[in-house]
Image (cartoon, grey):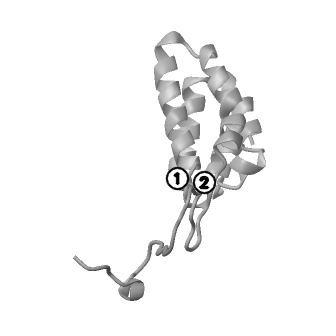
Amino acid sequence: MGEKSGAGQSGGVNISGKVGSVGGSIVGGDMTVVSVAALDAALRPLFASVGAAPAENQAKAEAKLAALKEEVAKGKDADDGIVAKLVDGFVGLVPAAASAVVSAFATPILGAVAGPVTKFVLDKIQGR
């Protein structure tokens, strides 16, 4: 088979020549990147609060947090309805974590993905 030309390419990345190691993402267009370290730091108090939940709710609370982390990692592409539902469900399982949740969404990384539905849920959690 011969080499294909990139002339008819519709997306992706076409790299020619010698390419060594790439120490990050190769981006050919718009891309939202959420720092895993910053996300972990913002969610750490929530994961720590799981122990305050009744034993029968701890596994469910951890699962909701894992799903929340996965969704908010999408950055601006996160589904606000899903984020709100996960936040509400988590606080339902771990009521003692309400202030930690509100504080976490006050951080720039999570505040940036909180849309109107999530903000409504956060206001509800705060009793507004």
Quadrant hosting residue 50: top right
Query: Which three-letter amino acid code belongs to the residue tagged 1?
Result: Gly
C-alpha gap between disc 1 and disc 2: 6 Å
**Mark closest to the chain's N terminus, 1 or 2:** 1
Q: Residue at x 40, y 81 (%)?
A: 10
User: From the image, which quarter does the N terminus lie in?
Assistant: bottom left
Q: Residue at x 74, y 31 (%)?
A: 99
| Residue 126 visible in this rendered orientation of the protein | no
Rendering coords of residue 46 (x, y %): 66, 29
Do callouts 1 and 2 mark residues in contact (Cβ within 8 Å)?
yes
Residue with the mark numbered 1: 81
Rendering coords of residue 83 (x, y %): 56, 47
User: From the image, which quarter does the C terminus lie in?
Assistant: top right
Above or below 126: residue 34: below
Quadrant hosting residue 93: top right
Quick check: 117 left or right of 104? left
Query: Which three-letter amino acid code belongs to the residue tagged 2?
Result: Val
Q: Which mark is drawn over residue 117?
A: 2
Above or below 60: residue 87: below
Q: Residue furthest front?
A: 18
Quick check: 126 left or right of 77? right
Rendering coords of residue 30 (x, y %): 59, 71
Quadrant hosting residue 26: bottom right
Rendering coords of residue 5 (x, y %): 36, 84
